[in-house]
């Protein structure tokens, strides 16, 4: 496994790989890797000859009061995990190379970026779309994988890829959960033990919603109410949003029609920690 931090070196490696007909796969991450990230590597390993994992805590996707400074980082551990899971290259660029002083360009995906996370984290998806576009131009992947855990991010990046004609296949890998249902996230490390116990209610709430839809409930308000009651039962969790939305546009849906691609998505605060989660609803 090679560790590459220079943008030019990464581009040269990508050009050489493409020149020799090697398919490049990209797993973009912000590090502090966990089994969810490993599942992203697993998802595309057999679809590419050069598997690149990027590690970059992207400053432009954090708001001024968010957790950029305290975002967990452990490069040594990440490198060991990446090596063990078959990454060929770990790309770790420096922030000053990705965003040199005269950097003035960003990518704004309208529409799907606006609701939910867009309301609570203004500018977040502009930062995400910009950095992923840059990675596409540096790593030159044929295929890139993102997690369903960040469902709206995945929808935004699909839109960007299509709208800007990036020749990249986007794969979305399923959410990886802890045994008690909590979706794996680098931010779970912020949870105090008592928060961690409370956090189980998120999965329970989403499961209640999914079960109700599977049993024939098609009214989003009723489905949402079930989840909300469970998630807020003990008062430890504050819900920022909990919405039943179209899985592509992230707009609210009317009745949940059989075969429609609908999901219930939430962002909550437990103590000082903000977590997101979602579940696909199948009528
Ligand atoms: O999902 C993430 O970890 C980040 O948003 C991403 C896609 C690596 C961009 O910084």
Image: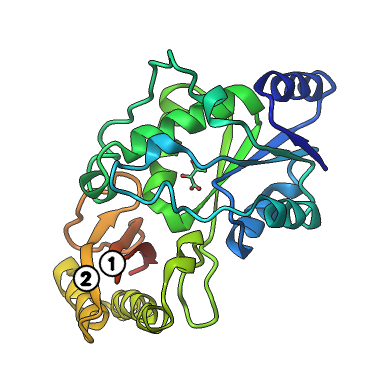
Is 200 on the left-hand or right-hand side of 146?
left
| Location of residue 57 in the rendering, given as x and y in whole percent from the top left corner | 51, 42
Closer-to-camera residue (117/67): 67
Residue 137, image x and y in percent?
58, 22
Q: State how far apart marks 2 and 1 are (Cα).
A: 5 Å
Q: Residue at x 66, y 31 (%)?
A: 142
* Image position of 276 (left or right of 185): left
Q: How many marks?
A: 2
Disc 2: residue Cβ within 8 A of ligand 1's nearest atom: no
Which residue does the numbered mark 1 point to in the structure image?
269
- Determine which quarter of the picture holds residue 238: bottom left
Q: Is residue 206 above or below residue 6?
A: below
> Which residue occupies the foreground of this view, 242 or 61?
61
Q: Which residue shows up at 69% across the image and 25% down it? A: 6
Left or right, 217 with reference to 192: left
Tell me if I can see residue 104 in this picture.
Answer: yes
User: Which residue was labeled with disc 2?
Assistant: 238
The residue at 51%/60% (across/down) is 186
Q: Are marks 2 and 1 in contact (CB under 8 Å)?
A: yes
Q: Quadrant of residue 108?
A: top left
């Amino acid at each position: 496994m090679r560790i590459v931090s220079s943008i030019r070196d990464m581009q040269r490696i990508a050009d050489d790989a493409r020149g020799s007909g090697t398919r490049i796969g990209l797993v973009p991450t912000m590090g502090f890797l966990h089994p969810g990230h490993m599942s992203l590597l697993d998802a595309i390993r057999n679809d590419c000859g050069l598997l690149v994992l990027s590690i970059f805590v992207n400053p432009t996707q954090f708001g001024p009061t968010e957790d950029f400074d305290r975002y967990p980082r452990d490069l040594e551990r990440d490198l060991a995990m990446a090596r063990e899971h078959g990454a060929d290259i770990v790309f770790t660029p420096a922030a000053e190379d990705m965003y040199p002083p005269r950097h003035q360009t960003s990518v704004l995906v309208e529409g799907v970026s606006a609701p939910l996370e867009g309301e609570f984290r203004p500018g977040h998806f502009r930062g995400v779309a910009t950095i992923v576009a840059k990675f596409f131009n540096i790593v030159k992947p044929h295929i890139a994988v993102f997690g369903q855990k960040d469902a709206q991010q995945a929808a935004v990046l699909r839109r960007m890829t299509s709208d800007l004609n990036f020749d990249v296949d986007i794969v979305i890998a399923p959410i990886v959960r802890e045994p008690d249902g909590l979706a794996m996230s680098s931010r779970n490390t912020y949870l105090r033990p008592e928060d961690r116990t409370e956090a189980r209610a998120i999965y329970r709430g989403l499961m209640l919603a999914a079960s109700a839809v599977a049993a024939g409930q098609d009214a989003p308000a009723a489905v949402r109410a079930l989840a909300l009651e469970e998630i807020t039962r003990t008062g430890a969790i504050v819900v920022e949003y909990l919405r039943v939305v179209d899985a592509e546009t992230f707009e609210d849906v009317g009745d949940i029609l059989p075969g429609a691609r609908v999901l219930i998505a939430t962002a909550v605060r437990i103590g000082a920690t903000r977590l997101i989660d979602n579940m696909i609803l199948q009528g």
